C-alpha cells in the first residue's frame, strides 16, 4: 500500500487532535500523533483492511476520549475557582475560536449555500435555514451550559437573550408606553425632528432594555453554584458583558433595518465583519483592545447594512448624500450610537466605586475575666 | 488519607487501568509499546485506541500512579516519545489488585472443589 496514505491519515488525525482541550493537546498530541503513525504504518504493511479497521477503531474511540478530556479540564478549571479565561489569548484553542466564530459564520454559510443554484425543484426543497439555525442554537447553548457558559458561548447567550428580550419583554414594554407616546406625538404633525425623537426613544429603549436584561440574567445565573464562575469572570473582565451584547447585535441589526433592501452579499459582508470582531476580541489581550475589536466589528457591520440600505443600491443607481432623506441618516446614526452606548455601558459600570469590604464587628470577649 | 486507605479506595481497578499498570510492571514503556502489550496480555480482548490510552495515561499521571520520563534512546525516529513507568503508589495499587483477584479466584476454586468432592 502507498505509504502516502499513512502520512495523509496522520495529518488528518493530527487535525482531529485539536479538538482536545488546549492543555491536553500541548501535553500529549505529539506523542499521540507518533503512536498513530506507528500503528498506521504497521497496519498499512499488513493490508488495506487492517488499516481501515485501525482508522475505524480510532474514530470510534476519539469522541469519548475528547469528551472525557474536556470533562476533566472543566473539573480542574472549576476546582481552581472558575478561572475560565486564558491569561494569554493566543493560547486559546482552535475549537474554542471556531465555536465562537460559528455564531455568525453559520448563517453566512447558509446564505451562501442558498445562493448556489439547486437542481432540486423549489417546492421539493423546503427552506431549512430557520430549523437548522434554531437547532444549532439549542445545541450550542446546551454545550455552553454544561461548561458553565465559557467565553465562546457568550454571543450565543446574547442571541437567545435578544430573541426572548425582543419577542416578549420589549413588545410588552412597548405596548405599555406606546399609547402615551402616540398620544403625545399624534397631537402635533409628525415632522422630521419628532420622528427622530420617537426613533431615538424606541431604539434607546430597546438597547437599554437588552443591557438590563443581560445584567439581570448574569446576576440570576450566579444564584446557582454551577454558574458562579460566570459572574466572577464578568466582574473580573467586564468586556464579557459587552461580548454578550455583541451577540445580540445581529438580531437587532436585522430588526432595525427591516426594509431588507440589501441583497444576500451585503448580509454576508455584515456577518463577516461581526465575525472579524469576535476573532479580534478573542485574540487581543488588553481590555481596551478587546472592546475596540467589538466596537470596530459592529461599526463596520452597521456600515455595510447602511450601504445596502442606501437608496438606489439595489437598482445600481447611487444616491448622493445631498439627496438622502435626513430621517434615514438620523435613524442610522441613532441605531449605531445606541449600540455603541450599550457596548460601553459595562465599562462605565466597572468604574463605579465598589462596596467597602465588610469589617467584622467586635464581638463580646471570649473569656470574661474574673 | 494514608496510603493503605488510598489503595483500598481505588480498588477494584477497571480492566484498562489494570492492564496498563500490568504492562508497566516489568519496566518503563512508551505509548505504542503499552498499546501492543495490553492487547497481547488480554489476548486481543482489550484493544486500546490512541485516544483511550492517552486519556487513561493522563488520569494515571494525575493520580500519581505512573510517572513520565523522556525516552532514553531519544533519536530522530522517536521525536517526542516518552516512557512511562510505575511509581511506588502505582506498584502498590497493582499488587493490591492482584492480591484481590487472587483472593477471588481462590475462594471460587475452593467452592468449586467443595461441590465436585
Image: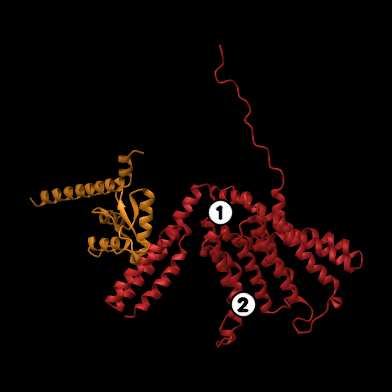
Percent across and percent down for residue A10 are: 39, 71
Task: Give the residue at x 30% y 77%.
Answer: A49
Percent across and percent down for residue A24 are: 44, 58
The answer to whether residue A59 is above or below residue B24 is below
Front one among B105 and B16: B16
Pinpoint the chain carrying mark 2: A
The answer to whether residue A92 is above or below residue A229 is below
> In the figure, is residue A177 to the left or right of A45?
right
Q: Secondary structure at mark 2?
A: helix
What is the count of numbered marks? 2
Q: Quadrant of the C terminus of chain A?
A: top right
Q: Residue A52 falls in which quadrant of the image?
A: bottom left
Q: Disc 2 marks which residue?
A: A111
Q: Extreme right residue here?
A: A188
Chain that is red in the image:
A
The answer to whether residue A239 is above or below residue A322 is above
Percent across and percent down for residue A114 are: 60, 80
Percent across and percent down for residue B67 are: 34, 51
Q: Secondary structure at mark 1?
A: loop
Residue B75 got which mark? none
Q: Is residue A316 something one can see in this rendering?
A: yes
Q: Disc 1 marks which residue?
A: A87
Front one among A353 and B76: B76
Q: Earlier in the sequence, mark 1 or mark 2?
A: 1
> In the figure, is residue A80 to the left or right of A244?
left
Palette colour of chain B: orange
Label 1 crowd (10 A; few <14 / some 14-19 / many >=20):
few
Q: Is residue A162 something one can see in this rendering?
A: no
Do the residues marked 1 and 2 share a common chain? yes
Amino acid at each position: 500500500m502507498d505509504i502516502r496514505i499513512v502520512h495523509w491519515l496522520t495529518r488528518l488525525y493530527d487535525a482531529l487532535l485539536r479538538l482536545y482541550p488546549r492543555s491536553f493537546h500541548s501535553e500529549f498530541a505529539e506523542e499521540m500523533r507518533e503512536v498513530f503513525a506507528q500503528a498506521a504504518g504497521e497496519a498499512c504493511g499488513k493490508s488495506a483492511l487492517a488499516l481501515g479497521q485501525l482508522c475505524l477503531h480510532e474514530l470510534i474511540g476519539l469522541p469519548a476520549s475528547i469528551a472525557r478530556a474536556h470533562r476533566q479540564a472543566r473539573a480542574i478549571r472549576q476546582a481552581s475557582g472558575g478561572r475560565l479565561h486564558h491569561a494569554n489569548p493566543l493560547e486559546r484553542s482552535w475549537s474554542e475560536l471556531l465555536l465562537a466564530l460559528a455564531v455568525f459564520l453559520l448563517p453566512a454559510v447558509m446564505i451562501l449555500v442558498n445562493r448556489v443554484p439547486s437542481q432540486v425543484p423549489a417546492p421539493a426543497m423546503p427552506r431549512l435555514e430557520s430549523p437548522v439555525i434554531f437547532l444549532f442554537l439549542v445545541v450550542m447553548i446546551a454545550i455552553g451550559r454544561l461548561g458553565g457558559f465559557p467565553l465562546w458561548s457568550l454571543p450565543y447567550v446574547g442571541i437567545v437573550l435578544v430573541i426572548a428580550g425582543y419577542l416578549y419583554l420589549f413588545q410588552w414594554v412597548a405596548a405599555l408606553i406606546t399609547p402615551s407616546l402616540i398620544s403625545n406625538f399624534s397631537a402635533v404633525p409628525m415632522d422630521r425632528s419628532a420622528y427622530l425623537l420617537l426613533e431615538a426613544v424606541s431604539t434607546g429603549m430597546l438597547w437599554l432594555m437588552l443591557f438590563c436584561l443581560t445584567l439581570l440574567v448574569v446576576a440570576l445565573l450566579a444564584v446557582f453554584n454551577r454558574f458562579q464562575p460566570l459572574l466572577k469572570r464578568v466582574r473580573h473582565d467586564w468586556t464579557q458583558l459587552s461580548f454578550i451584547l455583541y451577540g445580540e447585535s445581529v438580531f437587532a441589526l436585522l430588526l432595525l433595518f427591516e426594509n431588507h433592501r440589501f441583497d444576500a452579499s451585503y448580509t454576508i459582508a455584515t456577518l463577516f465583519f461581526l465575525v472579524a470582531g469576535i476573532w479580534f476580541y478573542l485574540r487581543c489581550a488588553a481590555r481596551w483592545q478587546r472592546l475596540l475589536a467589538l466596537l470596530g466589528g459592529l461599526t463596520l457591520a452597521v456600515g455595510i447594512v447602511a450601504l445596502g440600505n442606501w437608496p438606489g443600491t439595489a437598482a445600481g443607481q447611487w444616491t448622493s448624500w445631498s439627496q438622502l432623506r435626513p430621517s434615514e441618516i438620523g435613524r442610522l446614526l441613532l441605531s449605531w450610537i445606541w449600540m455603541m452606548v450599550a457596548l460601553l455601558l459595562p465599562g462605565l459600570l466597572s468604574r463605579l466605586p465598589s462596596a467597602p469590604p465588610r469589617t467584622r464587628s467586635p464581638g463580646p470577649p471570649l473569656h470574661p475575666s474574673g | 488519607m494514608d496510603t493503605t486507605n488510598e489503595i483500598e479506595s481505588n480498588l477494584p481497578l477497571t480492566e484498562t487501568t489494570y492492564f496498563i499498570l500490568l504492562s508497566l510492571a516489568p519496566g518503563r514503556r512508551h505509548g505504542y509499546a503499552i498499546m501492543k502489550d495490553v492487547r497481547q496480555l488480554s489476548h486481543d480482548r482489550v484493544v486500546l485506541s490512541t485516544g483511550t490510552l492517552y486519556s487513561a495515561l493522563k488520569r494515571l499521571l494525575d493520580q500519581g500512579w505512573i510517572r513520565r520520563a523522556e525516552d532514553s534512546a531519544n533519536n530522530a525516529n522517536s521525536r517526542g516519545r516518552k516512557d512511562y513507568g510505575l511509581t511506588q503508589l502505582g506498584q502498590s495499587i497493582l499488587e493490591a489488585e492482584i492480591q484481590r483477584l487472587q483472593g477471588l479466584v481462590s475462594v471460587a476454586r475452593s467452592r468449586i472443589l467443595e461441590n465436585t468432592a
